[in-house]
Image: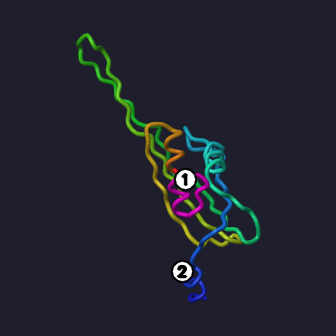
Amino acid sequence: MFSLTWLMSCQEISGPYYYRVASSQSDVPGVMAKEVEQVIRENLESKEGPESYCAEVSIVRYSSGKETYSFSGSEEGIAVSHGDVMLEVMVRIKKHDTTLRVFFISSGGADKSAVLIDMVKKLGKELNTEKKKW
């Protein structure tokens, strides 16, 4: 049994893939599973069938960035600065409900749409399934 499990974990997984975004009853505040699904659908090749692997994407963490307000007491008044938006997802590759591989992707950018596109680019490169050439 151990050797069979070891062989399965070392096998090359080269697709084709279809994608599922795992969502709990309460989505991560600020980013909805439907938004992630839409960006994946628009930018990655997907083929569902008996020979396909399921790439299940779970949102682990999302931050809309840090806003810093400062008051200098001068004519300029209040200055606002913004930090980067961040998204972290866990991707689980499955076939017939058996997990074959798990990895994490972290993305950052100026706004939510840039972060979602960055995450999909990284996912496409990892799985070699890019629909668009960035």
Alpha-carbon span between mark 2 and mark 1: 29 Å
**Residue lying at the far top of the rendered structure:** 75
Residue 28: which disc? none
Which amino acid, by three-letter code, is at mark 1? Lys
- The vertical placement of 30 against 71, above or below, is below
Residue designated by label 2: 10
Residue 91 horizontal/vertical position (percent): 56, 60
State the residue in front, 110 or 79: 110
Residue 26 in picture, x, y percent from top left: 62, 44
User: Label 2: how many residues lie within 10 Å, few (<14), some (14-19) or many (20+)?
Assistant: few
Q: Magenta stretch containing residue 126, yes or no?
A: yes
Element on which disc 1 rests: loop
What are the residue bounds of the magenta stretch? 121-133
Question: In front of the other: label 2 or label 1?
Answer: 1
Residue at the location (52% across, 60% down)?
125
Q: Residues within 10 Å of mark 1 (few under 14, many from 20)?
A: few
Query: Is 62 covered by the magenta stretch?
Result: no
Q: Is residue 64 left or right of residue 97?
A: left
Q: Position of residue 96 (x, y in %)?
A: 71, 71
Query: Please, what is the three-letter code of the amino acid marked with disc 2?
Result: Cys
Where, quadrant-wise, is the N terminus in this rendering?
bottom right
Residue at x 24% of width, y 18% of height: 72
Q: Is residue 71 above or below residue 31?
A: above
Q: Count up the numbered dots.
A: 2
Task: Determine contact: label 2, label 1, CB under 8 Å.
Answer: no
Is tag 2's residue or tag 1's residue first in the polypeptide sequence?
2
For label 2, the SS is helix
Q: Residue at x 45, y 44 (%)?
A: 86
Residue appearing at x 57%, y 77% in the figure = 12
Residue beneath disc 1: 133
Q: Nearer the viewer, residue 124 or 102?
A: 124
In the image, is 18 to the left or to the right of 134? right
